[in-house]
Amino acid sequence: MTIESNNDGSCLKFDNGIMIFYGNKGLNVTSTLSGSNYRATVNFPFVFPVAFIESPTAIIQTASDRDYNYCRVIGVLRNANNIQSVVLERTTEFSGDVGLQCIAIGHWK
């Protein structure tokens, strides 16, 4: 197994071709009204240190140790190189630091 890292997180590359990315970061967001809820879109919150061979399975959640503004993840766009965007939502307006955690699993070869 080898580990490769960048500012967004680390990839564990296993000899059998499986790769796991994990990252945790705080991001400054500002919401806008969308219907009856407030939403914020975060673009490119996580860039993988190593590309997957196809879009990985990704799990993204708000980080409980950084939830200054609690909200839920309602949408994620991803590709083999990064998490392209994450849409956050809650019932009241929010702005400030929101912590995100990401785990992505796929293949590197």
Image: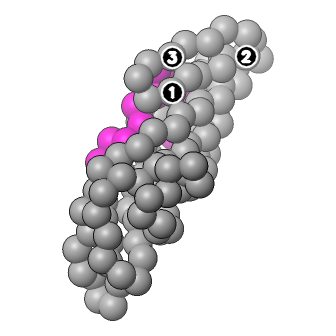
Q: Which residues are magenta?
A: 43-55
Residue 48 visible, this angle: yes
Disc 1: which residue: 9
Which secondary structure class fits the magenta region best?
loop
Question: What is the three-letter code of the residue carrying label 3?
Answer: Ser
Disc 3: which residue: 5
How are the colours assigned in the image? one colour
Q: CA distance from mark 1 to mark 2?
A: 17 Å
Disc 2: which residue: 14
Label 2 sits on a secondary structure element that is loop
Q: CA distance from mark 1 to mark 3?
A: 6 Å
Question: What is the three-letter code of the residue carrying label 2?
Answer: Phe
Label 3 sits on a secondary structure element that is strand
Closest to the camera, between mark 2 and mark 3, is 3
Q: Residues within 10 Å of mark 3 (few under 14, many from 20)?
A: some
Closest to the camera, between mark 1 and mark 2, is 1
Q: Quadrant of the C terminus?
A: top right
Q: Of callouts 2 and 3, which one flags the residue occurring earlier in the amino acid sequence?
A: 3
Q: Of callouts 1 and 2, which one flags the residue occurring earlier in the amino acid sequence?
A: 1
Question: What is the three-letter code of the residue carrying label 1?
Answer: Gly
Give yes or no for residue 101 being in the magenta stretch. no
